[in-house]
Image: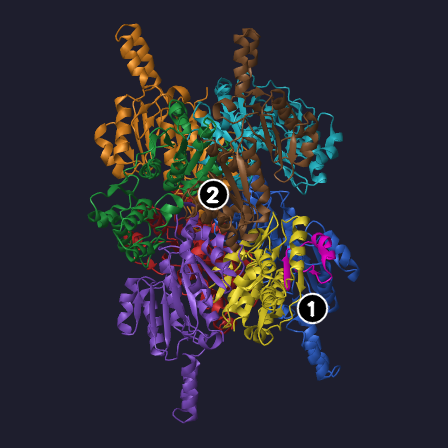
Chain colours: A orange, B cyan, C green, D brown, E purple, F red, G yellow, H blue
Amino acid sequence: MNPKTIEALFNQYKEGAIDIKDAMMKMKELPYKNLDYANLDNHRSLRTGFPEVVYAEGKSLEQLRGIISYQIKEGDTSILATRVTETQFEYLKDLSSELKYDPLSRTITLKRDDTEDIKNRYIAVVTGGTSDIPVAEEAAVTAEIFGSRVERIYDVGVAGIHRLFSKIDLIRRARVIVVVAGMEGALPSVVGGLVESPVIAVPTSIGYGASFNGLSALLTMLNSCAAGISVVNIDNGFGAGYQACMINRIQ
Amino acid sequence: MNPKTIEALFNQYKEGAIDIKDAMMKMKELPYKNLDYANLDNHRSLRTGFPEVVYAEGKSLEQLRGIISYQIKEGDTSILATRVTETQFEYLKDLSSELKYDPLSRTITLKRDDTEDIKNRYIAVVTGGTSDIPVAEEAAVTAEIFGSRVERIYDVGVAGIHRLFSKIDLIRRARVIVVVAGMEGALPSVVGGLVESPVIAVPTSIGYGASFNGLSALLTMLNSCAAGISVVNIDNGFGAGYQACMINRIQ
Amino acid sequence: MNPKTIEALFNQYKEGAIDIKDAMMKMKELPYKNLDYANLDNHRSLRTGFPEVVYAEGKSLEQLRGIISYQIKEGDTSILATRVTETQFEYLKDLSSELKYDPLSRTITLKRDDTEDIKNRYIAVVTGGTSDIPVAEEAAVTAEIFGSRVERIYDVGVAGIHRLFSKIDLIRRARVIVVVAGMEGALPSVVGGLVESPVIAVPTSIGYGASFNGLSALLTMLNSCAAGISVVNIDNGFGAGYQACMINRIQ
Amino acid sequence: MNPKTIEALFNQYKEGAIDIKDAMMKMKELPYKNLDYANLDNHRSLRTGFPEVVYAEGKSLEQLRGIISYQIKEGDTSILATRVTETQFEYLKDLSSELKYDPLSRTITLKRDDTEDIKNRYIAVVTGGTSDIPVAEEAAVTAEIFGSRVERIYDVGVAGIHRLFSKIDLIRRARVIVVVAGMEGALPSVVGGLVESPVIAVPTSIGYGASFNGLSALLTMLNSCAAGISVVNIDNGFGAGYQACMINRIQ
Amino acid sequence: MNPKTIEALFNQYKEGAIDIKDAMMKMKELPYKNLDYANLDNHRSLRTGFPEVVYAEGKSLEQLRGIISYQIKEGDTSILATRVTETQFEYLKDLSSELKYDPLSRTITLKRDDTEDIKNRYIAVVTGGTSDIPVAEEAAVTAEIFGSRVERIYDVGVAGIHRLFSKIDLIRRARVIVVVAGMEGALPSVVGGLVESPVIAVPTSIGYGASFNGLSALLTMLNSCAAGISVVNIDNGFGAGYQACMINRIQ
Amino acid sequence: MNPKTIEALFNQYKEGAIDIKDAMMKMKELPYKNLDYANLDNHRSLRTGFPEVVYAEGKSLEQLRGIISYQIKEGDTSILATRVTETQFEYLKDLSSELKYDPLSRTITLKRDDTEDIKNRYIAVVTGGTSDIPVAEEAAVTAEIFGSRVERIYDVGVAGIHRLFSKIDLIRRARVIVVVAGMEGALPSVVGGLVESPVIAVPTSIGYGASFNGLSALLTMLNSCAAGISVVNIDNGFGAGYQACMINRIQ
Amino acid sequence: MNPKTIEALFNQYKEGAIDIKDAMMKMKELPYKNLDYANLDNHRSLRTGFPEVVYAEGKSLEQLRGIISYQIKEGDTSILATRVTETQFEYLKDLSSELKYDPLSRTITLKRDDTEDIKNRYIAVVTGGTSDIPVAEEAAVTAEIFGSRVERIYDVGVAGIHRLFSKIDLIRRARVIVVVAGMEGALPSVVGGLVESPVIAVPTSIGYGASFNGLSALLTMLNSCAAGISVVNIDNGFGAGYQACMINRIQ
Amino acid sequence: MNPKTIEALFNQYKEGAIDIKDAMMKMKELPYKNLDYANLDNHRSLRTGFPEVVYAEGKSLEQLRGIISYQIKEGDTSILATRVTETQFEYLKDLSSELKYDPLSRTITLKRDDTEDIKNRYIAVVTGGTSDIPVAEEAAVTAEIFGSRVERIYDVGVAGIHRLFSKIDLIRRARVIVVVAGMEGALPSVVGGLVESPVIAVPTSIGYGASFNGLSALLTMLNSCAAGISVVNIDNGFGAGYQACMINRIQ
């Protein structure tokens, strides 16, 4: 239940299209919808400005279908599910022809919102290597579903730093920068020293041996000697894209 | 050497107050000033919009004095040194009567900037407990020296959550929120679920036993189930205040 | 061999139904039954008030069948096996039509006890998310097999804290509360600050990256700033349900 | 502000001893008292049945004095501060002759409560070694200040297990058992297998080398093969005594 | 090439059965046999009293076959390979009808030695649980192949400690005791406090959550407060059985 | 694009074989070739003396094919891809009959370079065990593709140290020594104490239990009491072979 | 109370020197002596063949004095206290002129036993470096107080392995070998491959950086590829000396 | 005893200046000099080309004095002791006026060698920050005492990367590069991508919080995506300088 639905409800009541009992009945689900296995946070959109996002990992096919179909039925304008497998999508795709699955970022999206996207400013999503792209795409898709423009700058890691410098202007003009890197995770420090926008660093689990599934990159980013960098969980492209979008929406 | 100094130099040359040789001599130090033990990044202010900040820990008295006195001489308008002990300040305080030492946040500041601060929006700095205040103050002082207004909301941790709710409006109206917490570090998750501004979480080393000097709080914050949260290093109030200020300055 | 069986034995002897040699023969197995690969602790029920519970993980099909069939033969009134796979259950189910398998909690139960359950007080089992439900069910099933009433309150995590508050009365009236949470594991701290009953916190392995398979949630719970919280091993729903039942049985 | 104070207030108003304005003024501080650096949770006693406990570590002398003197002034009937150094107590002791300092458990207590203690049941506090006693005393003092009777059974570790067996009856009759152990931390597992009361295990930081300041004992206790054991943070005698008291108070 | 083969060689030469050239040719391989991918340590038996043991994990079928067939050809009297899969054994079993595979301990053995085993003293191999038996069997088989007698005492863990006491005499009379335990690994501490023989403790990877694949049990054993205990690697039944055999062979 | 290709381009222009526009067009790709998902670092060969090496793990079949086919088309003289699976090679092998796949080291190589290899000096690649050979071969193949001669000395670990001593002369005469070892990783320390050439130590993930996938060997090597040893990541045969080749090429 | 004291008691009774009441009174303390803060395990000597050893670290001066004076009064023939500071000894030395303090091993010893030491066999105590000597001396003193002969072979670490080989015969003839090493801890592996006696490895906390206070050496020893090695806790010279003595006493 | 001393000995004998008995007596100490607490490795210089270096940490004043005075007496031409405190030097300085103490690198050096240093090539020692200089100086002093020329490039970390680029030519022309960095340790990756010489990376313990005393920088360097980098222990300037010198000496 998004802010527009609630506004509409008030107007319907004012215009006499519904009586108070029906209005209240619909309002009953405002705080959350209890699906037994899940309490969908309908109030979230009002409270935080963003609708609830579905984290598909660890949910059964039935649970996932129940949640998404409720969201579609409610007329949610920006549906996003992350960490979705192809198998999960197969089980869901008949729910609506508008549902789109992107295998690279492993997301399902459905966008009905008719509001204008923010066009005059953008988020730069930068990766160190080719293998970091899926996480970067999770960030990019998340930012886009909530109305941000994204510029992608991929495979510009520190081992061949001239590749980064050739793109530095595009990165510098972004309002906020998401930097995704695995292995030693040094890219955010270098980018952070070159720009005046906030950098959100995303460590990835790319690497082997002493990368310890992304721990090494995570520690690198937390200890960055460049100021203006904050960090999200390993492989958490969603979290970075979400916060970047929050910053990008600031008027 | 801050942007205004450079602009002044251009104007002095245009007006004939200095000749090209003198202008170039002054420009020579633009990229950095070599003090042997330190290369002061004069270009930083142009490149990132923020002057260089001095991290005092691990620097000798002589090194610290050399760096600060150079900054004062250059006419830097916002000098900030962090992690400064009282002993270090004693050794520096004759350099300028404008230098201020704050024992709580352990910072030295000197502010000459005559530009108007950003007043119509603010950063909320929130702590879980009383012992987290020094780190929070490092964040607050950092944000203030670079021109942000800060609202402090201290000791509102999750064990008595009504204290948080009584302040939630003040927190919600902030443009960006810094949440500082030690022990289990749960506060950012609760705040993050209640607001639509980005949250920068700062774990502190407050705790004992399995807090492992802040590691527990750090992991909690990285794994937050609330979206819109990013994290800085343990006790890194400076980093949080700096990035919060970056976001607060966005037009 | 449960307390009632022993009592019956004494009475049979007193009434002359069996002679002393037969009685002693039956008593021989009281301390434990040696199955070669396992020494079943028959004395446990007398000593601790609870019969032995079978941990199925890592046991071969033959071993499991041997143990369960011995328990059935002995007339145990509350049989519980945890971490049972469907394959394991298939191999066992012909032993008794009373054996029930629950795929969600992965438990086998058999309850013959005719004693009245404790009805006027209950255990609240609370989860942060949907994915924590299997662990919560292991706790709930364990508490129920030993005679406790359980109230389930699922998916009320801290990211949408109003969901918790809408259920807080039900939680507060419980005699003991089991709180199950993965990711950052902050829920027990919030609950602990709102109630006067003891809270048993169960970290789950739900999460990714720096959750390190539940380590993050475990540390959070151990460092809780709310008093009255103790913690069991990651995913150890059984242990929490068992101790909660112990507390609930206190007269 | 404890429940009795509030009750008295209602009665004073009913009897006309105070007018509504004064009553409301006094009620204003009910949720919490703001001391700038601390928000004292006055509501806690009503909400959780226990008054707020002061954790002295990391608090300045001034902060500590401010908090304790407020509690004394409010007439709190059970004041408890933990992790108090002798220096801190010196700075506080003139506040009231009723304040008692115990150097072994490092606690300050003040008990004015005239309610009868719970006498017919008790908590057993057990240690593995001599060096674990300070943590055990923190647990014992905590339980006693809130009205429980405590039996102390010290230095009965597993390396000479007959010492434990000679005390096992005293331990078994306890309503709840706190077991404190460092080094390998095996004692809770042995005790847990012998009793039918819940066991709260407290790992201590006693040990060296691979004890990693209590981490080894903590892991041992979390992995206990005996059921009915839950665990608190390393050296957290307070937490164990508090929860034990909660369980002991159950009617 | 075992000591007896060398002795025979000397005698053959002395008796003129072979000439010096042939003798030297045979001696050439004494220090080690180079199989390209492996340098078999033929000298080992002379140097350490034990022949080389084959660790099968990570070796290809061809490598394993090459090594074992060389050992058979050389007339080695005690062949032992550990961590052997059934697939590996299938590929080897035609080499000799004397090769025996034990699926529980995952060992291949071949024993031709006609020397009398040590009968008047024995090694006790003790386990905490049923799931620890495979590791215990690796220890037992290793000790037996090198001539020791082994007594097995399984599933006598600390959660039901009377099971241990009922077997304590058998354990006490052993010359050396191998104690195998997973989860919290407390058994060696209890055994160590009851006996006067050396205890070799073997942590196993049995457990879940904070057992961290045996790390918890390993730390417990290293920190044992009972003296006389030393520890081998997680799941290293072979190492424990080997050292136990060394001690048992002492005259 | 290797140095020779660029030199040829200059000569073609000088000789009038191409005009300036075509020359510049070809030079456009010098810094890097953008394949969308990868920015191939063509400048690398000029800058570091070594062409770019392809790390196949985590790259899709399409990405890998795109990169290798570009390198072949550009006439790169030394193509090396590491961590290549057989499946990946199957998808690539039709690109050129010159591509060779080595299943042991999991590398693809293509060598067209007609320059003479460095023959009068060599790199020694030494392993502790048989299972370390795949990592050692990755090092050897890497060194060979870039023109070094390699001597292989395998399975000479410290448990039978005479095997090492029998090869010590061959090792001592090497210009640089790569020592590959898993489990306790002690071999580099012993070798380092016996030679005057630099030793590059490679820990492998061979082992079990407390080897923690190579962490144990890594720590051993970092703490070596022998001087002259540096270390690369776990299983990073490529990195060791690469740096060894750098040192071997020094004139 | 050592075995001889008990034997004497029996004889005194038989000879009528004491009556049964007095005999029983003396026997009352046999299982343990309760000193409130410590339960001295008098039965230990009968049960394990070794008297109780006092671990001084973390004990107060009063506690230590109470324990040692009780042992002296009881006529214990082999008193050993470990980890004793000079300050602690100052507080104790007036108890008996026979008490000896050794600052290197930080032990107090008192030996009255008139039994012949085991002379025809010995324990070798070997160290990698000079800094490991204090831990080695703790092992040696422990073995000697309980009647073993010790040969010391110090500073023969693997970085100059010829030093080890020059002493190898002395080491080989030992019945059991204690190998003490810090940093990378490789020495036990090399020794273990050269001898046929059991090796007890002691990691020390000597080192810096990634030695992590002995963790690196501990892991090395646990993962040793040489068979016949077991390990004790970091810096646990006592534990190694104790178990070595157990093995050395085997008839 | 350095190679020249031995050569002189041979010549003295040939010329009849000493007889064979005296010559042999002097040769007796060649393998090592036994000082009881230390076996000085005299043979080291012959075997590895470098004399033994003294690691002062953890050695007593007497031990240190014994070792250094032996080296001076033997006429060692390049004496180096590392990790020397001022107190230790005070106790040593009367041994020879040639001993020099450098408080920054905490080294003692004595250089008598009259051989020409290697002048036409040099080692670059680079640091990320000012606080890394002591470790860098340990590397530089080590390389210099053994005859290498060193160029120092300090405080050129990645947060202001233009400082590095302004020095890149000096760095590129070095034969081998030592890169010293704390905090996130990203500098070696950036340098490694820009040069064709081998890079030896030294993590330092500079940093706080999640730097975990240098662990973060260590992991970063081990996971570097730039090839040609190997790593030494945290703060191990000596090890890096030593290996760099080995490489620099290659003819």
Is D117 contained in the magenta span? no
Three-letter code for the amino acid on which mark 2 is drawn: Ala
Dot 1: what SS? loop
Gap between marks 1 and 2, in whole Å? Answer: 47 Å
Dot 2: what SS? helix
Percent of width and height locating residue F50: 46, 53
Three-letter code for the amino acid on which mark 1 is drawn: Leu
Quickly name the residue at label 2. A217
Looking at the image, residue B156 lies above or below residue E217: above
Q: Which residues are magenta?
A: G77-106
Q: Quadrant of the N terminus of chain B?
A: top right
Residue G28 vs residue A59, the one in the foreground: G28
Quickly name the residue at label 1. H35
Percent of width and height locating residue E35: 38, 72
Q: Say left or right for A22 vs B19.
A: left
Percent of width and height locating residue G218: 52, 57
Q: Residues within 10 Å of mark 2 (few under 14, many from 20)?
A: many
